[in-house]
Image: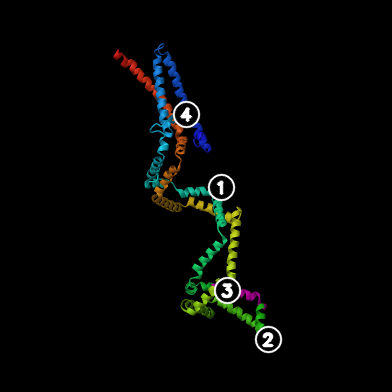
């Protein structure tokens, strides 16, 4: 307890620095009081021999009274002077809860008021400041490290089985449970209306033509295998060459002519398929059966599990390595975003307005709770510790009250004695 009293609960280096300054000021105030006492004793003893010392005695007497009165006032804030149970002392300990409630109410009404928050947010451009901050390499690296560490923490905490079950549940809800037939029909119909299949057919025909021209022998073997064995070889070569040339011309015509009968037939087939997928229950049932057969396959589930495990391991490796492609791109993206924030005033305005609206909404709805944090924190403090914390913070400045009281008391004592000696005493004699 004595140690706590000496240190006033100081913990950090800043606290001990404040404590040192407080002790110095207390020593100065006490030194002035002792000086006044010494002057009073000397002047009181010698004033009969040297009448002018009466003025000195009065000044020192007033100084002692002022010093003692202000010492009592300052001490009464934090503890009982001399340990005596004097009423209305040890005020902070006795009124701790009321002080906390008042401080919380003061903060709520004066610092968290709507107009105060709005005015303060209007003065600053948080988006531009964030852009300037992110433009600096070391700041962007810090943010990148924070994101990487947070992601690593999440990957470490997450249970693989739980993640896999969550992914499976989401896939089943959003991909497996809905009927695919009507959905595929609408998608295919939209695909056809946009003419996207035309480009796809042209690419397929172009690739097939390239393959036929680069691998004629493979095509010849495929055709020859279908011809009768008794057909002479010269006839087989003639048929192979003719079939190969006609096939190349056919594929080329399909690629170049959008009105080709084959392309028209494909358009009709796809249109019929889109309509049947949306209207024919038997085709829809076949699609649903195929869907469940695929997704309920143990191989597919094992593939999904191994895919997650592989992806997780790759993510962990890249997040741990500051030189990985992911980390490098993340850092570049943060700096690019900072540059855009600096240069784009419209984006700055949008972000600042959004932040202002969010902060004002939070303050408007939770300012009482924020203020309660202060009052509840003070309530949880021990009464003696609360007094010590406050004394440690403001005690140094309060010692000036004692010093000023000593000086003012001396001047007041001197003035009173002078008036009494020079004005009142002649009138009564």
User: Callout 3 environment at 10 Å: few (<14), some (14 to 19), or many (20+)?
Assistant: some
Of labels 2 and 1, earlier in sequence is 1
Q: Secondary structure at mark 2?
A: helix
- Identify the residue under disc 1: 138
Considering every residue shown, the one lying at the far front of the view is 85
Name which residue lies at 60% across and 75% down.
208
Of labels 1 and 4, earlier in sequence is 4
- Identify the residue under disc 4: 26
Of labels 3 and 4, earlier in sequence is 4
- Identify the residue under disc 2: 235
Q: CA distance from mark 3 to mark 1?
A: 51 Å
Name which residue lies at 67% across and 87% down.
228
Considering every residue shown, the one lying at the far top of the view is 49
Q: Is residue 130 magenta?
A: no
Image location (x, y in percent) of residue 326: 58, 56
Q: CA distance from mark 3 to mark 4?
A: 93 Å
Q: Which residues are magenta?
A: 200-217
**Applied colour scheme:** rainbow
Image location (x, y in percent) of residue 412: 37, 22
Q: Which mark is residue 340?
A: none
Of labels 2 and 3, earlier in sequence is 3
Of labels 3 and 1, earlier in sequence is 1
């Amino acid at each position: 307890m004595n140690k706590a009293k000496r240190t006033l609960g100081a913990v950090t280096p800043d606290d001990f620095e404040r404590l040192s300054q407080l002790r110095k000021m207390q020593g100065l105030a006490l030194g002035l009081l002792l000086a006044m006492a010494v002057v009073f004793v000397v002047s009181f003893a010698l004033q009969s021999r040297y009448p002018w010392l009466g003025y000195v005695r009065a000044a020192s007497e007033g100084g002692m009274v002022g010093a003692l009165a202000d010492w009592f006032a300052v001490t009464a804030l934090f503890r009982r002077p001399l340990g005596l149970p004097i009423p209305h002392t040890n005020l902070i300990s006795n009124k701790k809860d009321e002080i906390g409630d008042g401080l919380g109410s003061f903060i709520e009404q004066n610092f968290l008021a709507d107009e105060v928050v709005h005015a303060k947010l209007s003065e600053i451009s948080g988006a531009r400041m964030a852009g300037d901050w992110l433009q600096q390499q070391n700041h962007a690296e810090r943010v990148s490290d924070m994101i990487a560490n947070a992601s690593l923490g999440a990957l470490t905490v997450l249970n693989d089985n739980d993640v896999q079950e969550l992914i499976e549940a989401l896939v089943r809800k959003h991909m497996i449970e809905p009927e695919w037939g009507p959905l595929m029909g609408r998608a295919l119909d939209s695909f056809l209306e946009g003419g996207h299949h035309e480009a796809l057919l042209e690419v397929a025909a172009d690739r097939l033509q390239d393959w036929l021209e680069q691998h004629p022998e493979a095509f010849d073997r495929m055709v020859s295998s279908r011809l009768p064995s008794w057909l002479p070889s010269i006839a087989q070569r003639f048929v192979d060459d003719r079939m190969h040339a006609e096939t190349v011309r056919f594929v080329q015509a399909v690629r170049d002519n959008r009105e080709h009968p084959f392309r028209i037939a494909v358009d009709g087939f796809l249109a019929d398929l889109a309509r049947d997928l949306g209207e024919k229950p038997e085709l829809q049932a076949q699609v649903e059966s195929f869907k469940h057969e695929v997704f309920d396959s143990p191989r597919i589930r094992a593939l999904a599990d191994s895919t997650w495990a592989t992806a997780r391991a790759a993510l962990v490796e890249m997040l741990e390595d500051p030189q990985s492609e992911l980390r490098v791109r993340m850092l570049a993206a943060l700096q690019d975003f900072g540059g855009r924030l600096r240069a784009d005033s419209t984006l700055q305005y949008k972000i600042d307005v959004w932040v202002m609206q969010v902060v004002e909404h939070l303050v408007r709805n939770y300012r009482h709770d924020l203020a309660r944090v202060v009052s509840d924190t003070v309530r949880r403090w021990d009464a003696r510790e609360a007094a010590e914390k406050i004394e440690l913070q403001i005690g140094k400045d309060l010692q000036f009250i004692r010093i000023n009281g000593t000086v003012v008391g001396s001047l007041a004592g001197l003035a009173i004695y002078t008036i009494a000696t020079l004005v009142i005493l002649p009138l009564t004699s």
